[in-house]
Amino acid sequence: MPEKTIISSGLGHLFMTVFVFNFANYMVVPAILDVTMAALCPGEDECSLAIYLTGLHQAITGMGSLVMMPLIGNLSDNYGRKIMLTLPMLLTTLPLVILAYSRERNFFFAYYALKTLTSMICEGTVLCLAHAYVADNVAVSQRASAFGILSGVSSCSFVFGSLSTRFLPNTASIFQVATAVSMVSVVYMRIFLPESNLDAAVIAGSLKEETVSECLVEKGSTNNHRPFRRTLSFHDSVSLLRSSWTFSQAAIVAFFSSLGEVGLPSALLYYLKAKFHYNKDQFADLMIISGIAGIISQMVVMPLLVMIINEEKILAVGLIFSCVRIFLYSVAWSSWVIYLAATFQIMSVFAGPSLLSIVSKQVGPTEQGKAQGCITGLCSFASIVSPLIFSPLTALFLSDNAPFVFPGFSIACAAFAVMIAFIQSVMIRAPHAVPE
């Protein structure tokens, strides 16, 4: 069988699907804070209610994703990546429709409720399945570069989404355009994205197993074999963690790095709003700088770097720069320090693709969805823990009742979590990849 290459028709359509989908979702990020503040605390730059509500959303989303991600990863191994992409992409569009219609207080609460419900299923699903799709279609030796390119595509959508927010005339048009683009991404994926290379054989085997199971049930067999047994994902996730010490180490790194990174965005936005009075345009500028740095890194630097340095070292480099970047945010004494810290994204983005590549090499070709779902599920668990820690800290240290003057204290704690991930990463000694 000829070696798979990074660039193929299927991967090209996958990259375009991820770009358009993320473009729609990143468009609303700079604007959603202003919408939230206007609905909950109009005319104020600091709002504890908004901070706690954002944290509650993250925690509930994390609980749902903790269950759904391994399950969806398993289902995609059995039934194909494309079919499992359809539902989350459709559901993600629905909350945007509400704010496209109105941003009044009642509509905001309707958006918040629906967004929380859909995020329990959809949060991280598209990227999780995209990672599995890449692992299906790219040779082991090229996966680090391929994951880097996929992350670079996400950074491109981040930049263009933020730019569109910067130049669209008002908040209403931002959500209207985002809704339309999100719908386009679903249509594009259904028409152009082919099924993964792995899917035909796997689906055939899965359907055969279910047919046998159903026949046994119809005949009254006492055998305990049941249809859809392969979707019982919690046991599979535990087995994966036990199967490889390297996989377990990668899981620890994923948890602590996610703990810091998930706690950062909302804490940083509210911190910048309170200390420097940022609005949606300045948030967009900051995101554009971070996104451009990420594009340069993932599209140019990382493919060259993986040829001379192994993924374990690249992972450690990415985590230490991420730690420094977050700490600089926490102690920023002027707005230019914030922009300087954002440029560190050029090195910190190495961590994600390197970790995914290490994980994908610890399992066989029929378990990529399961492995990516397991890691994404752990990141979702971090999403549960993170707001329980960072939301109260952010609200406390931005208020007048802080025990000491350090508005960025919660952000510094996020840097400490990433430092723990870095310490664990330098201990990883990955064995040879599982053969395909």
Image: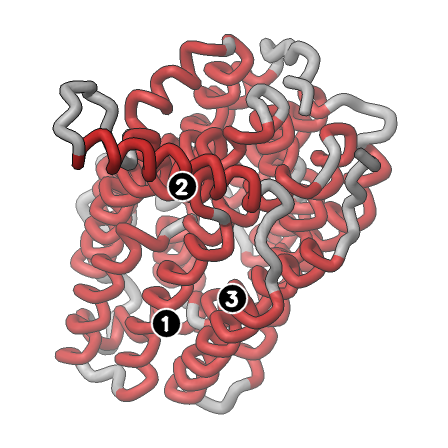
Q: Secondary structure at mark 3?
A: helix
Task: Please say if 32 is above or below 364.
Answer: below
Disc 1 secondary structure class: helix
Which residue is at a point 51% across and 17% down the rendered structure image?
Answer: 247
CA distance separating discs 2 and 1: 31 Å
As displayed, is residue 351 above or below residue 60?
A: above
Report which quarter residue 219 is drawn in. top left
Where is mark 1, residue-wise? 93
Q: Which residue is mark 2?
A: 207
Dot placed on the residue nearer the N-terminal end, 2 or 1: 1
Please provide percent x and percent y for residue 88. 37, 59
Query: Where, quadrant-wise, is the N terminus in this rendering?
Result: top right
**What's the distance in space between the residues labelled 3 and 2, CA to CA?**
30 Å
Q: Which residue does the image show at 42% across and 49% down from the upper left?
A: 124
Q: Nearer the viewer, residue 410 or 167?
A: 167
Residue 286 visible in rendering? no
The disc labelled 2 sits on which kind of residue?
Answer: Leu
> Which residue is drawn at the image coordinates 47% and 38% (left, top)?
77
Residue 91's quadrant in the figure?
Answer: bottom left
Q: Amino acid at mark 1?
A: Thr
Of the numbered discs 3 and 1, the one sitting upstream in the chain is 3
How many other residues sit within 10 Å of disc 3, few (<14), some (14-19) or many (≥20)?
many
* Residue drawn at point x = 16 percent, y = 71 percent: 109
Q: Secondary structure at mark 2?
A: helix
Q: Local crowd at mark 2 within 10 Å, few (<14), some, or many (≥20)? A: some
Percent of width and height locating residue 430: 64, 13
Name the residue tied to disc 3: 21
Q: Nearer the viewer, mark 3 or mark 2?
A: 2
Q: Amino acid at mark 3?
A: Phe
